[in-house]
Amino acid sequence: MASPDDQAAIKQIKIRTGVVKRIGKECAMYAKEVTKQEEHIEKMKSDGKDEYDIRKQNEVLEESRMMIPDTNRRLKAAKEELTQLLEGNSHLQEKEEYIAAQTLLKE
């Protein structure tokens, strides 16, 4: 049975792994949203839609683009935190949570 300190470390590893996964999904979602929005704007232009509507859609596109650097920064920080947590608890490297976290960081 793991000590209370080890159990707490395993719990933190699980939490940090989840954070990295969630932020990674956010990054992918924003990139996909930008692509989708660009296609939507091009379709609006080719269909001759109102200039005001196109301008508003461009604003939405720019908001999505602004989120990408922030999300990438948060992902980098979350990965660094997880890496430090793993380095500080290398004695747990046989645990399933530790292995899952290492695998995620290699992706």
Image: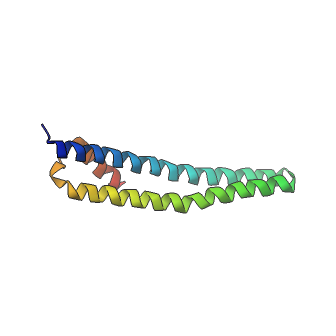
Q: Position of residue 69 (x, y in %)?
A: 54, 63
Q: Identify the residue shown where x is 34% and y is 54%.
A: 105
Left-right relation of 22 to 17:
right
Q: Position of residue 85 (x, y in %)?
A: 27, 55
Query: Which of the pair 91/12 is nearer the observer?
Result: 12
Q: Residue furthest front?
A: 4
Left-right relation of 53 to 93:
right
Q: Residue furthest top?
A: 1
The relative height of residue 80 versus residue 20 in the rendered view (above or below) is below
Left-right relation of 81 to 44:
left
Res. 75 image quadrant:
bottom left
Q: Position of residue 53 (x, y in %)?
A: 82, 52
Left-right relation of 87 to 77:
left
Q: Identify the residue shown where x is 30% and y is 49%.
A: 101
Res. 61 image quadrant:
bottom right
Q: Position of residue 50 (x, y in %)?
A: 87, 52
If the image is split into quadrants, where does the C terminus sit? bottom left
Query: Which of the pair 65/9 is nearer the observer?
Result: 9
Q: Identify the residue shown where x is 21% and y is 42%.
A: 7
